[in-house]
Amino acid sequence: MTSRRRIALLAISAVAALAAIGVGLFQVSKARCFSLVGEAICRVETEQPLVALTFDDGPTAEGVAWATETLGRHGARGTFFLIGDTVERNAPLVRRLVADGHEIGNHSFSHVRMVGHGAAFYDSEIVRTDALLRAAGAPRPTLFRPPYGKKLIGLPRALARHDYRLIMWDVEDPQDAATPQEYARQMVDQARPGSILLIHLMYRSNGVAREALPLIVEGLARRGFRMVTVSELLRQERYRR
């Protein structure tokens, strides 16, 4: 084998190895129940008939009104992971959520993927949103959900510095559900004691999810579940990674 061919083969092997590492890191970055650093909580191990409904993004007037009215009719409480940039323009909506007994979580300031950045970026995303949420009347947040579920090493380390817990989910919006009925059926069927359900209903494009929410709440209630905040669920004190 000539030296030129040997170098070419080594280069190909190196590229293949880097590609494999990249694919592996991508999979880890979006893993629901695993984090390279710290813990990623996707559900709570419990025999109690408890589940947590969580709502990402916003707040928007339409999404908050729909969620609070629906949950209020059934005596349910949810956890809302809000975007700092949007909170800055909609502080009264945060106050409404708090007044109705719902929990507020941090969903970053700019809603970009939380991978590939420096420590200062993560700190800023957390701290700016934290300050805006508290200024809007929310108790000091302790729960953080990464946009798109992305995290590797930098974000979990930043969360530890700021005394936050990383909250993921084990049941999420069904991407193939074309109707509210199918959306709700899939969500309710997948739920089990200790589940954390992820729902997106804040924006105009989330109409199916909004219409499905009453069906989800009713379906969970029929199965005997009580819908609580993530913090209430975490009091069960046993986590499943």
Image (tube, rainbow, N blue to C red):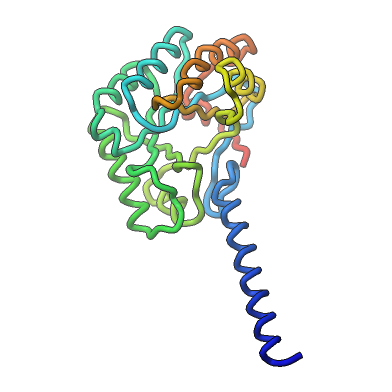
Image quadrant holding the N terminus, namely: bottom right
Say which quadrant the C terminus sits in: top right
Question: Closest to the observer: 8 or 33?
Answer: 8
130, 211: nearer the viewer: 211
Residue at the farthest bottom position: 2
Residue under the point 40% across and 47% down: 112
Q: Residue at x 40, y 15 (%)?
A: 66
Q: Is residue 122 above or below residue 57?
A: below
Residue at image point 37% right, 47% down:
162
- Indicate the position of residue 70 as horizontal and vertical percent values: 44, 12
Q: Which quadrant holds residue 84?
A: top left
Horizontal side, residue 203 vs residue 176: left or right: left
State the image coordinates of residue 64 (x, y, percent, origin top left). Answer: 36, 20
| In the image: residue 86, left or right of residue 234 | left
Question: In this rendering, is residue 125 above or below 25?
Answer: above
Image spot of residue 78 (x, y percent):
45, 22
Whether 113 is drawn above or below 225: the answer is: below
Kindly indicate the quadrant of the structure image that contains residue 2.
Answer: bottom right
Q: How far from the left and from the top, in percent, is residue 99?
A: 31, 18
